[in-house]
Image (spheres, rainbow, N blue to C red):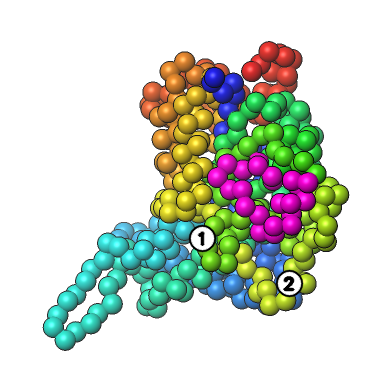
Amino acid sequence: MNSKRTFLLGAGFSRAVANAPLMNELWSKIEKVYNKEKTKNKRNREKWYKDLSNFIDMLEYSAKNNMDRLFDEKHKIDGGIRNNLEYLYTLIDLHIIGVPCFNINKEGVSIEPFPIVPLGFNKYYLPGELIQIRDNLTTLLYIVFVNLESKCNLLKEFSSFINQEDEFITFNYDLLLEKALWARGLWSPLGGYIGVSKFSREDDYKALKYNKRYSKIRIHKMHGSISWERSFDEQNILITLDDKENSKYHFEGLEKYLNRQPLSFEENVGYAGGYNPPWIFPSFIKPFNIKEIFEIWKSAINVIKNTKKLIIVGYSFRPEDTNSQLLLAALPNECEVILIDPKAESIRDRLKKLNIEINSYYNSLEEFLKINKRCSNFI
C-alpha cells in the first residue's frame, strides 16, 4: 500500500515555525552565541570562535587580493565567507581530503602534497588543524540549533494537521518537528528515527520501553540530528535525551519516565565544551560513509517511490544538496507534488527543468494550513 502523504522539510520549515536562521544568516547567530558565551567565561569556546574568525579573515583577505590582481579596477565585494558557510565547509573538506594533489617525487626528496585549490595565504594548515576549525564551527552551529524554540502557534497548528500514517523526510538538524509530534503523543525517541535506534544510556531505552512510549511516526533525518552523538568507538550513532547546554531533557516531560536527572554542561567533568555530532555537513562534499546515514537515505528513497502526495515545506533543493534531487528521481508519475515556500515560483521553475511537475504551491505554511485544514479529506 502506498504511503498517503510524505512531508519533505527544509530550513524554511524551521524558519516559519521558529524564526530559525537561513544559511546566509547563520554567522550573525554564531556571533550572538559567542557574545553570550563570553559572559560565561567558557574560555575554550571563546578561543575556538576567535580561531575560526581569524581563519575566515585570512581567507577573505587572500580572496580580495586575488581579485585585485585579476582586475585592473577595484571591485566591490558584496558579502563574504561569513555569508556562505557552505563554501567554507567545502573548502575545508577539499583540503582535508587532499585530492587531487600535486605530487613532486624525486629521489631522496620528500615533499608534502598540496591540494589543487590552495588556501592562498602563507601558513599552510595541516589536515588536523582544519578538522579542528571545522569542529569549532560545528560546535557553534550546534549551540544555535539546540536553542531553537517555537514562539508562535504555527508549529502546534502544523502538528495538529499530522496523522500517524504520514511519512517525514527532513534535512534539518533541529528538533522542532520531534518536539511538536512528541507533545501530541505521535512520536517518541523509542523507534522514532529511521536508521538510528540505540541510546547513549541503556537505562533510558529500558525506561521508555517499560512505559510503552513507542513512536507511532518515524522520521528520516537525512543530515543528522541534534539528538544524536557518536559512540566512544565511533562505530555507532546513538540517541541522547540530554540537552546539556541547558541542563534539561530535549523533550519536555521525559522526567516522568526516566529515573535520573538530566545531564548538565557544568557537571560533566573534563568536558571541554565541544560537540562533534554525526552530521552530514552543509558542504558540496557529502560522503555517505556512516552506515546509519546510508540506511536513512535508502529508506527515504523507498518512501518517495511509494508516496501518493509529496508536500515540500521550505526546501529549495540548493546546489550543495544535489543528492536530494535523487530523491525526486524516485517519484512515481502519479504522485501529487505540493510546494510551500516564499520563493515557490522560482523553485517550481527550477524543478520543472528536471521534469518534476508541481501540482500546487503556497507562499507560506500559514496559507497552506488555512486552506487545507478546512478539507478533512486532504490526505
User: Is residue 1 shown left or right of residue 212?
Assistant: left
Q: Quadrant of residue 1?
A: top right
Nearer to the camera, 259 or 359: 259
**Which residue is at a point 43% across and 54% down the rendered structure image?**
289
Q: Amino acid at mark 1?
A: Gln
Q: Is residue 191 left or right of residue 304?
A: right
Decide which of tag 1 and tag 2 comes sooner along the chain.
1
The dot on residue 268 is 2
Region rendered in magenta: 189-210
Residue type at tag 2: Asn
Query: What mark, if any, has residue 235 been given in the picture?
Result: 1
Residue visible at 41% across and 61% down in the picture: 93
Q: Position of residue 198 (x, y in %)?
A: 62, 52
Q: Badge 2, how many Cα within 10 Å: few under 14, some, many 20+?
A: few
Residue 223 counted in the magenta span: no
- Residue under the image location 47 percent in, 68 percent down: 131
Q: Is residue 324 above or below residue 290?
A: above
61 or 268: which is nearer to us? 268
Q: Nearer the viewer, mark 1 or mark 2?
A: 1
**Distance from the alpha carbon under mark 1 to that under mark 2:** 23 Å
Question: Mark 2 falls on what kind of element?
Answer: loop
**The residue positioned farthest toward the left in the image shown:** 107
At horizontal 60% and vertical 34% (from top left) the residue drawn is 168
Side of 95 where 5 appears, left or right: right
Tag 1 near tag 2, CB within 8 Å: no
